[in-house]
Image (spheres, grey):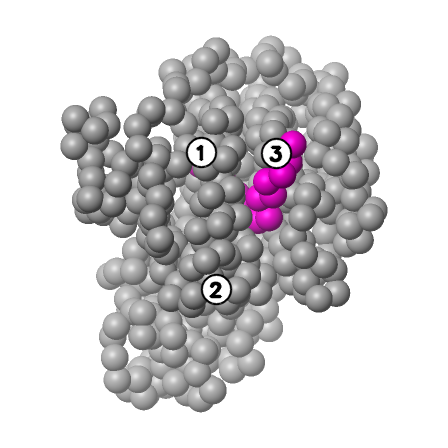
């Protein structure tokens, strides 16, 4: 949607912006927490300008912006959602893990917030085909919106997003198939195969998208196997130890609530190819710093596992790991096939089981802590679990310490539900498996939506696994990671993607 045509009182925006006397992104993000609603709104609308010219800087404060989407003040909500829309257009990977919040924006009472939500949903859906069912369903519904501008935009967005996804699918050799209720079947462009279904067949998703032979279908519906498969071998981690003096950080890759991550150069004499990921601790609180150091010690004790990210060096306020270009599952989004999703769950579960056997708890599993190791062409990239213990350190200044859509009850209220422990990791594995199989975070609006509703291709039997692994009461979850793994392995055959070894 043309930003110049969205419904906004530009004089009111200019007045709010004038109430804030800085353009510094860090300062603006801090003022989103001001007690003064005009100051919060002014900061949000100045961040709109920054998001269009300096998206990387604003991205570092995405959590604060997303929190402001629910602000009590309408002008704060309007500004914050506009920032989200700007970032989604420019860097859709930043919003991939927040997709449910983007969809929620499109149901807001305020027309401008709905418009911003539509822009954000369209941008992320276009980039991530795994979001196509939910994204196109929401955009299709918006074509009936009472706001004429939004309805026109949504109509065009359905066509544009479908064409973009279909082109990518064709290039990859997986033709796109759309199942749509009759009300929306005419929205889709020529050249895309559309099957009209009855409204009672798709009550939650009036549009359902699949991709050729590798659509996430049940085993008895699957055709040929996928072209890609797990790697035969994984590259060994570098057998070096780097010191702070060896490192020259030169490019920011991203950030977490606890650290800012950089690409860092290392001399070729120390490390072949000369690059590592440098993790700089940003917290200054002594207790958080101590928890960070303890976490690094725990992490280093189990980083000899194939699917655990390697710690190449660490200090009081930093760590260096194998270079990954900031590539995480949160940035990539869910895989295109059930087979790869099942394999990824298996890999991560093995890493967590290995850690638990050695007394190490991760405490904060979510897509942002899953990094990737590149493998040969035709093989799936291998997942590496990183940030062991970081959630505990982060909990010293932030609740919950991980994104809300993946947070266990004990992350939100440890006094009621207890400390982070092995049961927290079982919840985290369930949340990751849910995300990998549906492309959505499990918790939306304070409750877990059945995975078979999120992705109609999944059998209903999958819901029982998530009912147990994502239970509020720790005692109701699987007793051990091995129990979770056994249950998931039994389910894998029904998913059409048995665990590969």
Q: Is residue 470 visible?
A: yes
Name the mark nearer the viewer: 1 or 3.
3
Where are the magenta residues, as a range? 356-371
Quarter of image, res 242: top left
x, y percentage for residue 383? 49, 30
Determine whether label 1 and label 3 are within 8 Å by CB: no
Q: Position of 442 compared to 124: left or right?
A: right
Is tag 2's residue or tag 3's residue first in the polypeptide sequence? 2
Kindly identify which residue carries mark 3: 358
Determine whether label 2 and label 1 are within 8 Å by CB: no
Badge 3 local density, few (<14 within 10 Å), some, or many (20+)?
few
Decide: is 398 above or below 354: below
Tell me the number on the disc at residue 152. none
Is 414 colored magenta in this rendering? no
Secondary element under disc 3, as helix, strand or loop, is loop
Which quarter of the image is occupied by the N terminus? bottom left
Q: Give me the residue at 54% from left, 53% from top.
A: 391
Kindly identify which residue carries mark 1: 309
Is tag 1's residue or tag 3's residue first in the polypeptide sequence? 1
Distance from Cα at disc 2 to Cα at disc 1: 25 Å
Q: Give me the residue at 44% from left, 51% from top.
A: 293
Secondary element under disc 1, as helix, strand or loop, is loop
Kindly identify which residue carries mark 2: 287
């Amino acid at each position: 949607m043309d930003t110049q045509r969205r419904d906004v009182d530009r004089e009111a925006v200019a007045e709010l912006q004038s109430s804030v006397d800085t353009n510094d992104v860090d300062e603006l993000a801090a003022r989103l927490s001001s007690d003064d609603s005009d100051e919060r709104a002014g900061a949000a609308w100045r961040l709109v300008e920054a998001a269009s010219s300096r998206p990387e800087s604003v991205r570092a404060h995405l959590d604060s912006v997303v929190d402001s989407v629910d602000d009590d003040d309408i002008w704060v909500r309007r500004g914050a959602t506009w920032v989200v829309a700007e970032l989604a257009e420019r860097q859709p990977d930043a919003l991939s893990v927040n997709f449910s919040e983007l969809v929620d924006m499109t149901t807001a009472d305020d027309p401008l917030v709905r418009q911003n939500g539509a822009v954000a949903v369209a941008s992320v859906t276009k980039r991530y085909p795994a979001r196509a069912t939910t994204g196109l369903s929401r955009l299709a519904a918006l074509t009936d919106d009472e706001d004429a501008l939004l309805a026109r935009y949504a109509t065009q967005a359905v066509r544009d997003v479908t064409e973009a996804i279909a082109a990518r699918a064709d290039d990859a050799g997986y033709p796109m198939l759309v199942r749509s209720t009759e009300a929306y079947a005419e929205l889709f462009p020529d050249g895309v195969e559309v099957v009209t279904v009855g409204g009672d067949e798709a009550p939650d998703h009036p549009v359902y998208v699949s991709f050729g032979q590798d659509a996430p279908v049940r085993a008895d519906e699957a055709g040929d196997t996928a072209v890609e498969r797990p790697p035969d071998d994984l590259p060994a981690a570098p057998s070096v130890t780097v010191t702070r003096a060896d490192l020259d950080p030169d490019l920011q890759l991203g950030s977490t609530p606890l650290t800012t991550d950089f690409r860092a150069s290392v001399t070729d004499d120390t490390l072949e190819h000369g690059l590592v990921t440098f993790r700089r601790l940003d917290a200054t609180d002594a207790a958080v710093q101590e928890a960070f150091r303890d976490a690094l010690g725990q992490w280093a004790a189990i980083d000899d596992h194939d699917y655990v990210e390697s710690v190449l060096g660490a200090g009081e306020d930093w760590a260096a790991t194998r270079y990954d270009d900031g590539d995480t599952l949160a940035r990539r989004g869910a895989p295109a096939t059930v087979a790869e999703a099942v394999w990824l769950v298996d890999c991560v579960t093995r890493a967590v089981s290995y850690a638990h056997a050695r007394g190490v708890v991760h405490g904060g599993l979510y897509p942002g802590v899953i990094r990737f190791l590149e493998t040969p062409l035709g093989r799936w990239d291998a997942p590496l679990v990183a940030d062991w213990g970081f959630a505990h350190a982060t909990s010293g200044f932030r609740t919950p310490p991980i994104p809300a859509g993946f947070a266990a009850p004990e992350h939100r209220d440890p006094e009621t539900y207890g400390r982070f422990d092995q049961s927290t990791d079982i919840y985290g594995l369930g949340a990751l498996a849910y995300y990998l199989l549906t492309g959505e975070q499990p918790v939306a609006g304070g409750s877990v939506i059945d995975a078979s509703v999120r992705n109609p291709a999944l059998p209903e039997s999958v819901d029982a696994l998530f009912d147990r692994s994502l239970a509020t009461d720790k005692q109701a979850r699987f007793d051990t990671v091995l129990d979770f793994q056994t249950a998931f392995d039994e389910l894998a055959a029904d998913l059409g993607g048995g665990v590969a070894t």
